Amino acid sequence: EAGVAQSPRYKIIEKRQSVAFWCNPISGHATLYWYQQILGQGPKLLIQFQNNGVVDDSQLPKDRFSAERLKGVDSTLKIQPAKLEDSAVYLCASSSLAGVSFPSSYEQYFGPGTRLTVT
Amino acid sequence: AQRVTQPEKLLSVFKGAPVELKCNYSYSGSPELFWYVQYSRQRLQLLLRHISRESIKGFTADLNKGETSFHLKKPFAQEEDSAMYYCALMDTGFQKLVFGTGTRLLVSP
């Protein structure tokens, strides 16, 4: 099966500019996640969608970050305006909760990530 | 609050040596724990999960609730094991993963 797709792979912007990232999950996966991974740290969940509804956005800086998944498939993550501390890799992941087997429902499949540099 | 601690940023061993990557967690419930791996220029991917009690690529990990640990072990390291390893805990209430900071394993010939 095709994996999680993300674009762009790299982005360099100046502070106070805006940027958007796109994610296409694995076909049929109901759950989509956006993570932020700052250099030297593990991925941190920003937002989780179940179909097109938000399950958890408790760690999303809502004053500048927004995300949507309008048709329950693709998703976009936007930052406006960007700050220097937003420099990170933004990872998208998806998982299927339709599996009968308990463990399989919790495997998350990750995209290649978008490396954002804010100057 | 849920927390995953990986105390070593870098672990360097020679080929054929045993490997143990440490992971400790804090969680007020019955944890679901995972090891994810990222090889050079590849995506983050699941290596193994404790509930499956499996051995993948020679790696095993045992959940020790008394010590709140989930260390990853391999008796004989191979050069192709060189990668970044992340321990992760699943918050089963919200179905979200909490990752540790990762340990880079470097296996030298």
Image (cartoon, coloured by chain):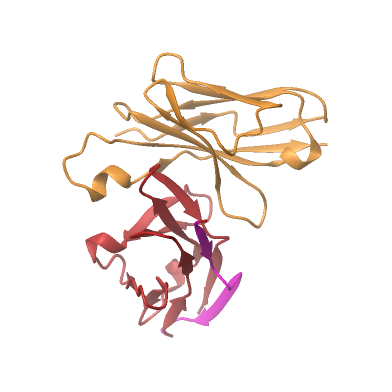
Q: Residue at x 82, y 26 (%)?
A: A16
Q: Residue furthest left?
A: A100
In magenta segment, residue B8: yes
Toward the bottom, the furthest residue is B17
The span shown in magenta is B2-16
| Chain in orange in the render | A
Of residue A24 and residue B52, the one placed in the foreground of this image is B52
Q: How many marks?
A: 0
Residue A14 is one of the magenta-drawn residues: no
Determine whether, in the image, residue A107 is placed left or right of residue A69. left
Residue A39: give x, y in percent of width and height.
67, 52
Q: Is residue A9 left or right of residue A72?
A: right
In the image, what residue occupies the spot 45% across and 14% down?
A: A70
Residue B59: x, y in percent? Answer: 33, 71
Q: Note whether A98 is above or below B73 in the view shown.
A: above
Quarter assignment of residue B64: bottom left
Between residue A92 and residue B1, name the one nearer to us.
Answer: B1
Q: Position of residue A59 (x, y in %)?
A: 59, 39
Q: Is residue A47 above or below residue A70?
A: below
Question: In this picture, is A82 found above or below A37?
Answer: above
Query: Which residue is situated farthest in the top direction here?
Result: A71
- Outermost front residue: B28
Counting from the top left corner in percent of width and height, residue B79 is at 46, 72
Q: Which hue belongs to chain B?
A: red
Give the side of residue A38 with respect to residue B67, left or right. Answer: right
Q: What residue do we see at 66% from left, 48% from top?
A: A38
